[in-house]
Image (cartoon, rainbow, N blue to C red):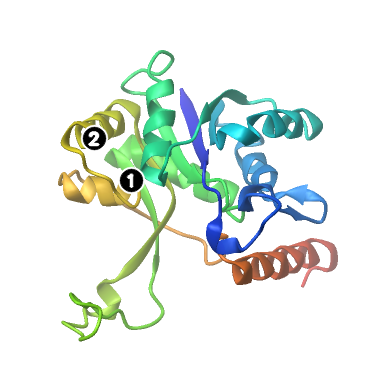
Amino acid sequence: MTIALIFAGGTGKRMNSRSKPKQFLEMHGKPIIIYTLEHFEYHEEIDGIVVVCIKEWITELKGLLKRYGITKVVKIVPGGATGHDSVYNGLSAMKDSMGNDDIVLIHDGVRPLITKELISENISAVLKYGSGITAEPVRESVVRSIDGESISDVPARDEMYVAKAPQSFYFGKILELYEKAYADGVKTIDSSHLCSIYHAPMHMVGSTKNNIKITEPADFYIYRALYEALEGQQVFGI
């Protein structure tokens, strides 16, 4: 069984949106979270979807799922205080229905420009290597600073990548790491960071270039431009 775990538990403070969390903002009349969910809804290898959502917005989400015909969502789980907590909540809620050798794809609810091929490549990576971490080469030099003022070193750019999503694993392995982190009081940025802390092997899956995460207002407008460009390719063949 292969399940997508979509976390949409953040309030989106950096979006400066007073009316709605960022995942519920609309583009052409449809919420961002629905654009994201549709990729997994229509993928033949995805058996079900679990969504981690802000508690106060769960009723709204249920209405949207019905309105847009999203039928693969099997569970909606209240989010946590951080992204790490939200993923942990989601994985914990899946324990009764998932086996250790089932596959889980962990994905941001505000990362709506993934592709069918990227989902398939993540699943294949787990089957072949045990994990799949979507990543993209950096396009500019990366500098490291310990104190936030002086530059400590500049790693070789051709060795640097940006971790994105989906991040995919055998369910038993990733649950074990999150439970260990909970016991140790460890909080992480994402699942790849968690794997790094506990020295778990990770296999890289090449990301699509437009796999952006909508975090700030500028990201929303970039997403809209990219989406409309993709629509233009379909209609006009450009």
**On the rendered image, what quadrant is the C terminus found in?**
bottom right
Residue 22's x, y, as percent? Answer: 62, 53
Which amino acid, mark 2? Leu
| Element marked by disc 1 | helix
Mark 2 crowd level (few <14, some 14–19, many ≥20, 10 Å Cα): some
Relative height, residue 113 to residue 94 (above, below): below
Q: Residue at x 84, y 68 (%)?
A: 236
Please tell me the numbered disc located at residue 191.
Answer: 1
Q: Residue at x 66, y 59 (%)?
A: 17
Residue at 69 percent of width and 28 percent of height: 59
Using the image, tell me which numbered label, if any, was put on residue 177: 2
Query: Residue 184: x, y in percent?
Result: 16, 36
The residue type indicated by label 1 comes to Ser
The Cα atoms of the two marked residues, 1 and 2, are separated by 9 Å
* Disc with the residue nearer the chain's start (1 vs 2): 2
Q: Are marks 1 and 2 in contact (CB under 8 Å)?
A: yes
Name above or below for residue 211 compared with residue 218: above
Q: Please state the horizontal and vertical placement of residue 84, each as a whole percent of the image.
A: 36, 43
Q: In the depicted view, which residue is nearer to us: 183 or 135?
A: 183
